Amino acid sequence: MAPTRSFDPRDPEFRTDPHRFFARLRREDPLHWNPHLKAYALTRHRDVFQVLRHPHFLATPMRANTATLLRRSGRSLPTLDRLIEAAVLFDSTPGHREARRMLVATLNMRPLGEYAPLMADVTDRLIDALRGRPSFDAVSDFADPLPVHVIHRVLGIPEELFDTLRAATWGLDGLFNYVKAIRELVAWDAQCRTGFAVIDDLVRQRRAAPREDGITRMIALAAQDGIDHERLVARIFFLIMVASDTTSATIGNAIALALATPGIVDAITDPATTAAAVEELLRLEGTALFAARYADRDTELAGLAVPEGTVAYCYLAAANRDPEAYPDPDRFVAGRGGPPHFAFGDGIHACIGASFARLEARIALHAFFTRLGPLRRVEAGTSWLPLDAFRHLARLPVAVD
Amino acid sequence: MTSTPTRPKLRTTAIKAWLAGHLHDVLGIPTEQITADATFETFGLDSVDGVVMASELETAFGIEVDPALFLRNPTLEAVFQELQDEGIADIEHDG
Ligand code: HEM
């Protein structure tokens, strides 16, 4: 393996097995200055915890960064800018609290448990289509569509628009990449235009004829908060985006790990341990690799004085396997205890969809492994989507025994 | 990264001339300073400049490159090497 000093987080070798690199970094250089990122890379549980709760480490100013890049290349992409403005993840303004509260209130339109039948229905339909097939792709036939269908149905998107919207959100998680090509930003802007047009139309329809659905709910909440139509549309689109690929990737990663490691399938299929198994899978292979933060003033980072502007990548996936927090960290131990993991982040930007996603993953994985019979992988090695911030399988062909 | 199916032939003099023009226009750097072994750092480029340059290179030569091409490679020489190694272009060293 290359020496720690030259650790390049965009290296394909790193993408294949980041955990090996993380183990070494954590041991040898836990407060690692990375020349490629021009940022610190944090891999210890306690350091990640501290930075995510630090009052002077704020979310990446994605809006300003993107505007600077586009300005210097002589462009402006107003639709993409609307999406980034709506993305509370990148919002460190006082408006963040209110926007976040609105998204929480949207999900809380029902008690969590009332989403279970919808999630089970989406799951069962996908599984019904797979039954009897000798082989299929667990990613594109199951893990990828499932959360997309769930969030679409929660919001009340009609089924005939699923594919158009899915194409519009696909790949937007590349926004979190360390470096983005201008051609990618241009393509994402076009996708946002398509997506916003679909949502815009639906919002108008629901205003005219309210329903019992998420969009109608968000219209009411936006009215309370004084959010204009354009911002509301962007916010709905953002919610779809942020609920989709994260959950898809998590379910795909869980299936892959379960098929590779004895004991996991049993833990998932036993209803007494499903929840604990999902929790442990989130810790071991949650999709979010990092949360990025920057210092808004001269401050201190894991005991080191750092100047304003310092960027810190909190590697969630690394902290989740810190042996100091989780003894024998690479082992799957359902119900192992220990401190909360960071699969959903922490601090003021902690995931608002965590309970929702957990419920969804439990329902999906339990049904997948009970209803389809014994499965095995038919391809050696894994191919990951070329994303910097998320571990998301490109495919996972499986055969039914 | 995806390589372009029809790999264009690119002359090093053409790329050098393009880069010299670009850096002159954007940062006012005298063209004679742009040589294959001059490090980009010495021109005071920041990471945003690097990404913009990668995009301009794509447009100028009809290729698709990693947006970090000029961030990861310290010199034009190294850029030529990467374009060749990644199968993005056939680089003809013509001076
Ligand atoms: C297993 C699936 C999921 C994973 C692994 C996940 C992961 C994360 C992580 C790590 C963050 C924090 C990022 C940071 O601090 O930079 C986050 C934030 C967020 N997540 Fe999730 N998420 C998942 C599902 C969902 C779902 C289903 C929703 C909505 C229905 C959702 C909505 C959000 C929102 C709105 C934020 C931003 C919160 C803020 O900035 O205040 N997520 N998520």
Image (tube, helix red, strand yellow):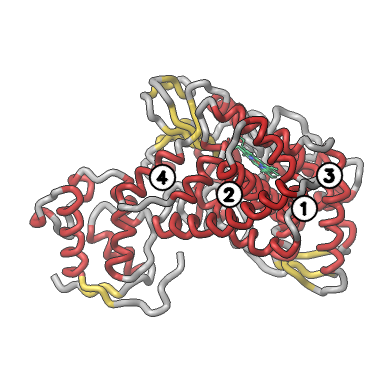
Q: Looking at the picture, does residue B66 appear above or below residue B85?
A: above
Q: What's the amino acid at mark 3? A: Tyr
**Marks 1 and 2 share the same chain:** yes
The chain that hosts pointer 2 is A
Q: Looking at the picture, does residue A206 appear above or below residue A341?
A: below
Q: Secondary structure at mark 3?
A: helix
Mark 3 vs mark 1: in front:
1
What is the spatial separation of the Cα atoms under label 4 and label 2, in whole angstroms? Answer: 20 Å
Tell which quarter ligand 1 is in.
top right
Q: Which quadrant would residue A98 be assigned to in this image?
A: top right
Of the two numbered discs 3 and 2 on the same chain, state the one appearing first in sequence.
Answer: 3
Mark 3 vs mark 2: in front:
3
Mark number, residue A153:
1
The chain that hosts pointer 3 is A
Q: Which quadrant would residue B92 be assigned to in this image?
A: bottom left
Residue A188: x and y in percent read 50, 56
**Marks 3 and 1 share the same chain:** yes
The chain that hosts pointer 4 is A
Q: What's the amino acid at mark 4? A: Thr
Number of residues whose C-alpha sits closer than 10 Å to that of mark 2, classed few (under 14), some (14–19) or many (20 or more): many
Mark number, residue A390:
2
Relative to B33, B88 lies left or right: right
Residue beneath the point at 8% across and 56% down: B32
